[in-house]
Amino acid sequence: MQSAVNYNPNNIYVPKKGLPVTIITGFLGSGKTTLLNHIIKNQHGLKTAVLVNEFGEIGIDNELIISSDGNMVELNNGCICCTINNDLIDAVYKVLERQEKIDYLVIETTGLADPLPVALTFMGAELRDFTRLDSIVTVVDTANYCLDLFDSQAAHNQIAYGDVIVLNKVDLVDKVYLDSLEARIREMKEGARILRSNNSQVPLPLILSVGLFKSDQYFDQREANNHHDHHDHHDHHDHLENDGFTSISFESDKPLSVREFQYFLDNLLPENIFRAKGIIWFDESPKRHIFHLCGKRFTLDDDEWKGERKSQLVLIGQNLDHNNLKKQLENCICKSFC
Ligand SMILES: Nc1nc2c(ncn2[C@@H]2O[C@H](COP(=O)(O)OP(=O)(O)OP(=O)(O)O)[C@@H](O)[C@H]2O)c(=O)[nH]1
């Protein structure tokens, strides 16, 4: 396997130091899970382990990530945005300890996480001898690029620390806008490899095993972070949660009514919900429906049920009225099942 080996002068292939790791970051709904699925489908001949961190109590990504032989999905619902979070270290150890050899590790952070502490975790004493951070890939939703709006260090860092920046959803924007966005991003992150994509379909050799992560640029940051940790445990300093982002999880083993749900979307959904995703069982349909909302746009796709039918929905936004929204979603449950 080419990617994880070094060529030495004695003509012997020796493993490079550690498991190669790529971090996928990017704002809510930008196309990270779509990219992860693209990787899982197309990393032929490699055993790729996947760690996913989600914002929200119920893990919808669990349902959305394809899982095929040789790939492993480890869900970690804790917060990996903090350096001191041991869940990430434990999850990586679990991957390293697997009997079956894993060739590559891909980590998807939440859309609200600052990727820097995640990257720094791989340079800490626990992991640096066993892993090798290959690249940070940032997915940008070009149709909903609103960094100015969020005015957040975490959203800024997602771009600033991206070794590869994927301008995704090019089908939804015109070329002139795309060119201006690319110029802006280039200013924020000089020298980044910038790719454009539809449905995160980027050539994998341009994002994986690229060796673009340069650890020496981060040593100062690590020092700063270590210093910070000693003084202030569990301060999610640049965390977007601080900007009022919260999530609401809704789950039911009963079907929803299409009409009620449509009414909820058309009339009740507040402007400050930025992202929603879910698996929905509608009384009127034998299909499993996958719901996504990113910014103002929503999609509802058909799929087949494999396990038990159920409805699961996560709403993410700023300053949400949790009780009211939960009540409104309860009202969408098909009346004959109540
Ligand atoms: N039109 C269009 N939709 C896309 C594209 N890429 C992804 N999507 C859709 O955007 C929605 C969100 O995609 P995800 O891959 O779930 O985004 P994410 O970044 O993982 O989302 P979070 O984990 O919630 O932050 C889904 O409905 C995707 O099908 C694209 O290039 N064009």
Image (cartoon, rainbow, N blue to C red):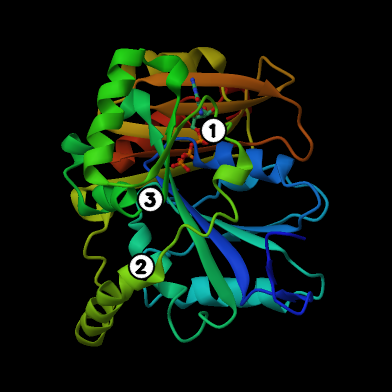
Task: Tell me the residue at 62%/27% (across/down).
Answer: 255
Q: Name the secondary structure under disc 1.
A: loop
- Disc 1 CB within 8 Å of nearest ligand 1 atom: yes
Q: Amino acid at mark 1?
A: Ser
In the picture, measured across the screen, residue 262 lies left or right of residue 258, that is left
Quadrant of the rendering where the C terminus is positioned? top right
Mark nearest the camera among 3 and 2 is 3
Label total for image:
3
Q: Amino acid at mark 2?
A: Pro
- Asked whether the beta carbons under mark 1 and mark 2 sit within 8 Å of each other, the answer is no
The image position of residue 35, as x and y in percent, is 57, 39
In the image, which disc is placed on residue 296? Answer: none
Q: CA distance from mark 1 to mark 3?
A: 15 Å
Mark nearest the camera among 1 and 3 is 3
Query: Which residue has dot 2 on it?
Result: 117
Viewer-proximal residue among 16 and 276: 16
Depicted 171 relative to depicted 303: above or below:
above
Q: Badge 2 local density, few (<14 within 10 Å), some, or many (20+)?
A: some
The image position of residue 230, as x and y in percent, is 24, 87
In the image, which disc is placed on residue 162? Answer: 3
Question: Which sits earlier in the primary sequence, circle 1 or circle 2?
Answer: 2
Q: Name the secondary structure under disc 2.
A: helix
Q: Amino acid at mark 3?
A: Gly
